[in-house]
Image: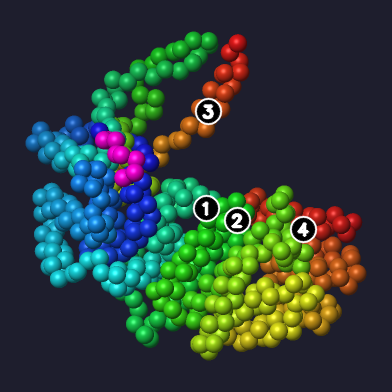
C-alpha cells in the first residue's frame, strides 16, 4: 500500500535522484562489485528515503546516507538470497570486508568512481549500441523508455541491449577501473566516440534530437571535469559549436537549411564563445587530435559573418591536417567542398569525381549531393539533376530521420526541372 | 511506472510435484513477494485458478457466445499476474530476474502498462459533445 508522501519531500527526493543517482550508483558499483546489485540497492535506498524522510526529515548529507543505506540493503538482500540457495556467503563476507575500509561520500573518491563507471559502460568489449544505451542509463540517469523513444526502438529492444551489455560486463569480469596511462588514449577514444555517437543521434533526429544532444554535451562537461584531456576539450568544443546552429539549421516547417543559407543571427553566441575558447585551449596543448581539428573548422565557420567571407583557405588547411591524422573518404569529401569554395567549383568537382571513381563513397548520399551542388554552380544542370537523383535514391526508404534531407533533395530536383 | 508480469507454468510438471516440493516453492516465492512489497515494488497481483476453469466470450451472429476453457490452449498456462512498480523496464526485468518462480521452470512475460490517459481524454471530449 503506497503511503502518500508530502509533496515537498517527494520533490526533494526526485531532484536528488536526478543530481545524485549517478554518483551514488558509481560508488555502489565499487563497493558491491556488481552493476545490477548496485542499481537495485540504489533504488531500495531511494525507496527507504521516500518512506522514512517524511518522519525523520532529510539527512544533512543525503549522499552518504543513500550510499550506506543502499549498501546495508544490498548485504541484507544477499543474506536473504543466501538463505535461499546458500551460495553467496563467501561473497557477502568479501563485500563486508571491502566496505569496512571504504570511506563513502568523499568527493574525490566519488569522482574517481564516476570515471570508472564511464569507462566500464564504454568498454570496447561491449557492442556500440550497448555502450550507448548503458551510458545513457547508468551515467545520464535516463530510463529505458526515454532512451528507447530517442532511438525509435521499442523499450523491450532497448532493455535487451542493456541486459546483454551488463551480461558481457559480468561474464568477462570487466574490471571497474580507470585505464592506466598506456591504455588511456585508446580507451578514452572509445568513450569520446560513444559521447559523439549520442550527440550525432541528436543532431540528425529532428524531434527527439535536442534532448540527446543536450545529454551528450552534459556528458562532455562531466568528462572534462573528471579528465581534462585536450581531446575531451576538443569534443566538447565541437559539440557546442555544432549545437549553436540548431535553431538556424531547419526552417519552421522542418526543412533543412544549409550552412550557406542559414540566418547567422540565430546562432547561439554563448555556445559559440564557449566552444571557441575550449577549442583554443585544446589547440594550445599541442596534444590534440581529430575532434579538436573538427572543432577548429567549426570555429572558423562560427567566426564568419557569411559563407562568402569565410576563410575557406584556413578550413582547407585544417582538413589537410585532419586527413593526415585521420584519413577517411568523408574527410576528403569535406576537404573537396572547402577547395571548391576557395579555388572554384571545378577544382572541388575534380576531387569528388576522383573520390567516387576510387569507389569510395559511391553509396554515400552526401557525396552525390555535394557533386550535384557543384555541377549546379557550374551550370551543368542535367548532370546536377542526375546527381541529386542519385543522392535521393540512396536515402533509406521510410527512414524518418532522413525526412528533411529527402524534402531538400526533392526540392532541388524540382528547381532544376 | 507500472509493469504487468504474466507468470506461466507447466501444469503437468506442477501436478507431478510432491506436496513438500510445492510448499517449498510457494514459501520461497511468497518470501520474495514480501520483499517486493516491503520495498514498494508490489503494486498488486493475483494467482489464477487453472485454465480449465476459464470461460471465454466472443461475439458471433449478433450475440455474445461463451465457450468452455481458455482463449488460447497451450501447454504452459497463465498462472498469475503481478503488477510491479519500477523505475523503468530494465529495473522491472532485474526485479523479476530474481523471482524464485523462475528457478522452478516458470516463465515471466514483462510488459509496460499502456498509457490510455490521452485516448481517454479525447474520448471524454467526444462524448461531452455528443451528449445534449
CA gap, disc 1 to disc 4?
25 Å
Secondary structure type for disc 4 = helix
Which residue corresponds to mark 3? B121
Quarter containing the C terminus of chain A: bottom right
Q: Nearer the viewer, residue A39 or B112?
A: A39
Say if mark 1 contacts mark 2, CB within 8 Å.
yes
Secondary structure type for disc 1 = helix
Chain of the residue on which disc 1 is drawn:
A
Which of label 1 and label 4 is nearer to you? 1
Q: Main secondary structure of the magenta part?
A: loop
Q: In the rendered view, does B35 fall on the left or right side of A368?
A: left
Say if mark 4 contacts mark 3, CB within 8 Å.
no
Chain of the residue on which disc 4 is drawn:
A
Which residue corresponds to mark 2? A205
Chain of the residue on which disc 3 is drawn:
B
Residue lying furthest left: B20
Say if mark 3 contacts mark 2, CB within 8 Å.
no
Amino acid at each position: 500500500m503506497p503511503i502518500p508522501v508530502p509533496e515537498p519531500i517527494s520533490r526533494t527526493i526526485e531532484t536528488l535522484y536526478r543530481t545524485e543517482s549517478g554518483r551514488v550508483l558509481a560508488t555502489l558499483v565499487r563497493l558491491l562489485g556488481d552493476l545490477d546489485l548496485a542499481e537495485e540497492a540504489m533504488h531500495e535506498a531511494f525507496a527507504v528515503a521516500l518512506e522514512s524522510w517524511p518522519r525523520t526529515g532529510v539527512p544533512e548529507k543525503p549522499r552518504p546516507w543513500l550510499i550506506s543505506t543502499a549498501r546495508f540493503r544490498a548485504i541484507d538482500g544477499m543474506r536473504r538470497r543466501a538463505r535461499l540457495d546458500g551460495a553467496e556467503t563467501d561473497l557477502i563476507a568479501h563485500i563486508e570486508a571491502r566496505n569496512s575500509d571504504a570511506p563513502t561520500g568523499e568527493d574525490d573518491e566519488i569522482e574517481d568512481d564516476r570515471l570508472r563507471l564511464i569507462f566500464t559502460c564504454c568498454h570496447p568489449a561491449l557492442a556500440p549500441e550497448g555502450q550507448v544505451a548503458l551510458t545513457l542509463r547508468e551515467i545520464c540517469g535516463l530510463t529505458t523508455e526515454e532512451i528507447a523513444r530517442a532511438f525509435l526502438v521499442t523499450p523491450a529492444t532497448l532493455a535487451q541491449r542493456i541486459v546483454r551489455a551488463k551480461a558481457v560486463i559480468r561474464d568477462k569480469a570487466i574490471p571497474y577501473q580507470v585505464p592506466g596511462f598506456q591504455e588511456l588514449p585508446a580507451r578514452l577514444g572509445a568513450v569520446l566516440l560513444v559521447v559523439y555517437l549520442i550527440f550525432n543521434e541528436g543532431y540528425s533526429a529532428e524531434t527527439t534530437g535536442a534532448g540527446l544532444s543536450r545529454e551528450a554535451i552534459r556528458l562532455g562537461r562531466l568528462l572534462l571535469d573528471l579528465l581534462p584531456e585536450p581531446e575531451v576539450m576538443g569534443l566538447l568544443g565541437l559539440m557546442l559549436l555544432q549545437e549553436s546552429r540548431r535553431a538556424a539549421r531547419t526552417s519552421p516547417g522542418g526543412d533543412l537549411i544549409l550552412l550557406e543559407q542559414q540566418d547567422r543571427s540565430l546562432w547561439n553566441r554563448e555556445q559559440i564563445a564557449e566552444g571557441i575558447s575550449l577549442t583554443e585551449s585544446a589547440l594550445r596543448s599541442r596534444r590534440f587530435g581529430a575532434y579538436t581539428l573538427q572543432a577548429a573548422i567549426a570555429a572558423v565557420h562560427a567566426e564568419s559573418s557569411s559563407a562568402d567571407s569565410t576563410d575557406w583557405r584556413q578550413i582547407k588547411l585544417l582538413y589537410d591536417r585532419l586527413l593526415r591524422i585521420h584519413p577517411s573518404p568523408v574527410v576528403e569529401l569535406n576537404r573537396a567542398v572547402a577547395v571548391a569554395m576557395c579555388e572554384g567549383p571545378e577544382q572541388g568537382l575534380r576531387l569528388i569525381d576522383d573520390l567516387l571513381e576510387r569507389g569510395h563513397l559511391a553509396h554515400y548520399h552526401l557525396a552525390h549531393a555535394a557533386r550535384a551542388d557543384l555541377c549546379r554552380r557550374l551550370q551543368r544542370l542535367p548532370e546536377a539533376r542526375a546527381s541529386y537523383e542519385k543522392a535521393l535514391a540512396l536515402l533509406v526508404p521510410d527512414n524518418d530521420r532522413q525526412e528533411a534531407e529527402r524534402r531538400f533533395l526533392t526540392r532541388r530536383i524540382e528547381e532544376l526541372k | 511506472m507500472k509493469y504487468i508480469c504474466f507468470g506461466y507454468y507447466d501444469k503437468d510438471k506442477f501436478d507431478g510435484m510432491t506436496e513438500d516440493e510445492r510448499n517449498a516453492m510457494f514459501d520461497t516465492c511468497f518470501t520474495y513477494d514480501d520483499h517486493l512489497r516491503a520495498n514498494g515494488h508490489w503494486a498488486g497481483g493475483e494467482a489464477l485458478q487453472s485454465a480449465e476453469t476459464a470461460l471465454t466470450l466472443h461475439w458471433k451472429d449478433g450475440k455474445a457466445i461463451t465457450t468452455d476453457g481458455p482463449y488460447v490452449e497451450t501447454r504452459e498456462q497463465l498462472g498469475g499476474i503481478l503488477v510491479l512498480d519500477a523505475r523503468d523496464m530494465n529495473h522491472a526485468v532485474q526485479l523479476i530476474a530474481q523471482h524464485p518462480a523462475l528457478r522452478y521452470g516458470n516463465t515471466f512475460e514483462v510488459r509496460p502498462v499502456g498509457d490510455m490517459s490521452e485516448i481517454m481524454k479525447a474520448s471524454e471530449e467526444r462524448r461531452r459533445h455528443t451528449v445534449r
